[in-house]
Amino acid sequence: MVVEPRVKDFICTTAHPVGCAQNVKNQIEYVKSKGAVKSDNAPKKVLVIGASTGYGLASRIAVAFGYGADTLGVMFEKESNGRRTATAGFYNNRAFEEEAHKAGLYAKSINGDAFSVEIKEQVIETIKADMGKIDMIVYSLAAPRRTTPDGTKYTSVLKTVGEEYTNKTLVLKDNTITDAHITAANDDEINATIKVMGGEDWIDWMQALSDAGVLADNVITVAYSYIGPKITFPIYAEGSIGQAKKDLYKSADIINEKFPNIKAKIAINKALVTQSSAAIPIVPLYITLLYKVMKEKGLHEGCIEQMQRLFMDKILDDTQVDDNGFIRMDDWEMRDDVQEVVAEHWDTVNNDNVKDIADIDGYWEDFYNMFGFKIDGVDYSADVDIM
């Protein structure tokens, strides 16, 4: 089958198996080109929860090929049914495992709902059978819904808190500028978003792993967040998703207090094109403006560059934190000289100049790359086995 991209709103409904594999290989080569971490304390047995796309996939690649770590990944992806392609995450994960095995590394994945008790139990049994004990857990879940162990279902929302909000946004289907009007979440919606995207499940994972006796004496766990500039505060840092992230921060404190052998950390990452960020109103326009400025200044990083820098340079050094104890991977994004230009462009961007002051091509390149398309060296006219 010749596989072509089919884009609907902020998602691509097809994925290219060869392109996804090449994308993974490119990320691996980047990490290898930077060399292994120079630390005797580098983790060697790593669990990545949410391992198949974006920051989770990049984390797994960084620890495997930067630390030489054995990795167990948890994902929730669909296989091909013979008529439709598998999801990009499925192809990514398969390609990663193949490359890890070639390098002599243990790599296994469990496909299922990471929120569920059943998957936690399956992970624990796999660790006991194959890895003994683990010394790092990356928590990188980004899901729209969650079913808690008692069977209650929650759905997150991307809304403001308190007041409605209107600001510019980029219409992805035609690259035009328009106003996005975002309604305020009610209390039930805020609570549901916290249930899905907050830290309760992160704590549940630490409790389950600790109770099962599969944690090493000194364990690092890290979860990811984003803060961003004031432009995006109403929809992100101060919106419904921001309330969930505040819960995530509190959960790190709870983990540190409850489990003496676990050191929980929060990494504040850079704004990037991911399947999650593409769905958030206003944010895609900000990203295109940011990309333009950061590329011009030689500061731009993608997921793999961010995660390579996090795991090689920062996460093992407890001094590399801000006043809140956060690891600031957005340090280059939030530089004054970057944000001043982005703010100026935000005020002036319109349909006449958007292609000049915003990196729309770069946004779409990253978007298609997520699904295995527009990767250099891949023949997209060739038949591929989507199974």
Image (tube, helix red, strand yellow):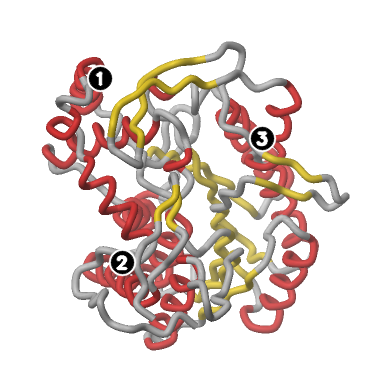
Of the residues under marks 2 and 1, which one precedes in the sequence? Answer: 2
Q: Disc 2 versus disc 1: distance between alpha carbons? A: 31 Å
Give me the residue at 72% from left, 34% from top.
192
Q: Is residue 167 visible?
A: yes
> Please, which residue is most extreme toward the right here?
150
Report whether 320 appears left or right of 140. left
Asked if disc 3 and disc 1 are in contact, CB closer than 8 Å, the reply is no
Tell me: residue 327, above or below residue 240: below
Category of crowding for the residue at label 1, using alpha-carbon neighbours closer than 10 angstroms: few (below 14), some (14–19), many (at least 20) = some
Asked if the residue at tag 1 contacts the one at tag 2, i.e. Cβ–Cβ closer than 8 Å, the answer is no
Q: Of discs 3 and 2, which sits in the foreground?
A: 3
Between 138 and 264, which is closer to the camera in this rendering?
A: 138
Q: Nearer the viewer, mark 2 or mark 1?
A: 1
Q: Residues within 10 Å of mark 2 (few under 14, many from 20)?
A: many
For mark 2, what is the residue?
Answer: 27
Q: CA distance from mark 3 to mark 2?
A: 32 Å
Q: Give the mark nearest the N terminus, 3 or 1.
A: 3
Q: Which mark is residue 343?
A: 1
Which residue is identified by label 3?
193
Q: Amino acid at mark 1?
A: Ala
Q: Is residue 224 left or right of residue 299?
A: right
Residue 366 point in image, percent of width and height: 30, 53
Quarter of the image that includes the N terminus: bottom left
x, y (%) of residue 228?
39, 29
Query: Going 52% across and 21% down the picture, which residue do you hit?
Result: 182
Q: Nearer the viewer, residue 193 or 321?
A: 193
Q: Tell me the kind of residue under disc 2.
A: Gln
